[in-house]
Image (cartoon, rainbow, N blue to C red):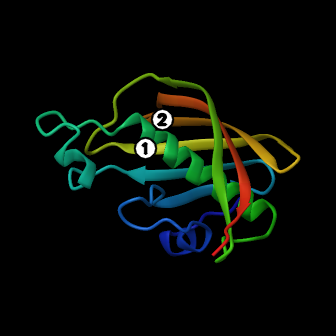
Amino acid sequence: MDALSIHEVLNYLPHRYPFLMIDRVTEFVEGERIKALKNVTYNEPIFTGHFPHHPIFPGVLILEAMAQAAAILAFRSVGQSPGEDTLYLFVGIDKARFKRQVGPGDQMVFDVSIARNKRGIWQFDATCSVDDKTACTATILITSSEIKS
């Protein structure tokens, strides 16, 4: 099992502040699964509007974070990293369920495993938990995409 620091994460994701949602990878098993985390702080730019008096991390960004973890798993499993002309992009989200709110001070832990890879469409089973309690579950679908300049 491998771990990745934030510096190594940056090699596998083209996202940057404020849209980089993975702080560290704590476990990686090639072709199988990944465990990654994000520390949620009060300084997140989203909290100025969602919601100023009761900050809640948006569910759509939790799904984005799970997709970013899935992209790292896919890139590392095929021995690639994003280039100027290739990215992994969302093609679907199924069965998304939110079980609890996430806010400042929480650490989200993402457990993502490959369910299948068929004709270039990767399907992942993903869970986000905080303090060992499920916050969100979803099936994430991504595919590699060529970027045209």
- Percent x, y of residue 29: 75, 54
- Percent x, y of residue 116: 83, 40
Tell me the element at label 2.
strand
Q: Which residue position is annotated with label 2?
A: 129
- Percent x, y of residue 98: 45, 24
Where's the N terminus, which quadrant? bottom right
47 lies above or below 125: below
40 lies above or below 53: below
Locate residue 124: give its quadrant.
Answer: top right
Question: Which residue is drawn at the image coordinates 28% and 39% (left, top)?
Answer: 103
Question: Which residue is drawn at the image coordinates 57% and 53% (left, top)?
Answer: 68
Q: Which residue position is annotated with label 1?
A: 61
90 lies above or below 60: below
Outermost right residue: 119
> Marks 1/2: CA distance?
14 Å
Question: Which residue is drawn at the image coordinates 78% and 57% (left, top)?
Answer: 30
Q: In the image, what residue type sits under mark 2?
A: Ser
**40 and 28: which one is in front?**
40
Question: Which residue is drawn at the image coordinates 67% and 68% (left, top)?
Answer: 147
- Percent x, y of residue 34: 66, 50
Residue 134 lies left or right of residue 103; in this view the side is: right
Q: Residues within 10 Å of mark 1 (few under 14, many from 20)?
A: few
Q: Residues within 10 Å of mark 2 (few under 14, many from 20)?
A: many
